[in-house]
């Protein structure tokens, strides 16, 4: 966790089996996670990835918490923490893409 900078949990629900004292989470921003309906619809299915990102990015547009994450990233390293076992198709990966596009 050294070098992680600000560790931000970006899930709406606390990850199962992750003890809060061991997670070393600095900030929990439920507001940047997908809505429950979108999360359940997606279900980490690769075939839905493109549509999931389109819908999720629409949800993120204008959220003040996104601006806060961008500001933190300008100050230093921000690590997006998530609970999904799927490492390629999850909201943290999509959020990272959205933040990178928003920063440029």
Image (spheres, rainbow, N blue to C red):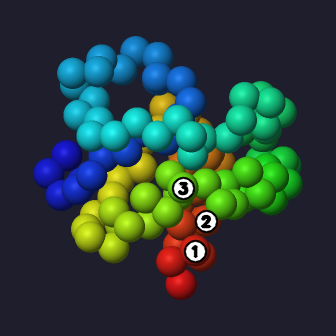
Give the Cα distance between marks 1 and 3.
13 Å
Mark pair 1, 2: CA separation:
6 Å
Determine if residue 88 is in view.
no
Residue 104 relative to residue 38: left or right: left
Which image quadrant is residue 36 in? top right
Q: Secondary structure at mark 2?
A: helix
Residue farthest to the bottom? 104
Q: State the image coordinates of residue 37 (x, y, percent, origin top left).
A: 80, 30
Vertical position of residue 18 compared to residue 35: above or below? above
Where residue 60 sits: x, y (%)?
A: 66, 55
| Above or below for 63 versus 83 | below
Residue 43 at x, y percent in the picture = 75, 33
Residue 102 tag number: 1
Residue at numbered disc 2: 98
- The tag earlier along the polypeptide, 2 or 3, is 3
Task: Report, in whole angstroms, how far the alpha carbon at label 2 lies from the one at label 3.
Answer: 14 Å
The residue drawn where x is 19% and y is 46% is 1
Disc ID at residue 64: 3
**Which residue is rendered at x = 28% and y = 30% of the image?**
23
Residue positioned 54% across, 55% down in the render: 64
């Amino acid at each position: 966790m050294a070098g992680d900078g600000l560790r931000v949990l970006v899930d709406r629900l606390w990850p199962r089996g992750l003890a809060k004292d061991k997670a070393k989470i600095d900030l929990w921003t439920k507001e940047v996670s997908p809505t429950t309906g979108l999360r359940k619809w997606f279900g980490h299915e690769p075939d839905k990835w493109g549509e999931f990102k389109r819908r999720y990015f629409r949800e993120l547009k204008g959220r003040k918490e996104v601006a806060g994450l961008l500001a933190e990233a300008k100050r230093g390293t921000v690590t997006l923490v998530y609970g999904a076992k799927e490492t390629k198709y999850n909201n943290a990966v999509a959020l990272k893409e959205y933040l990178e596009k928003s920063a440029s």
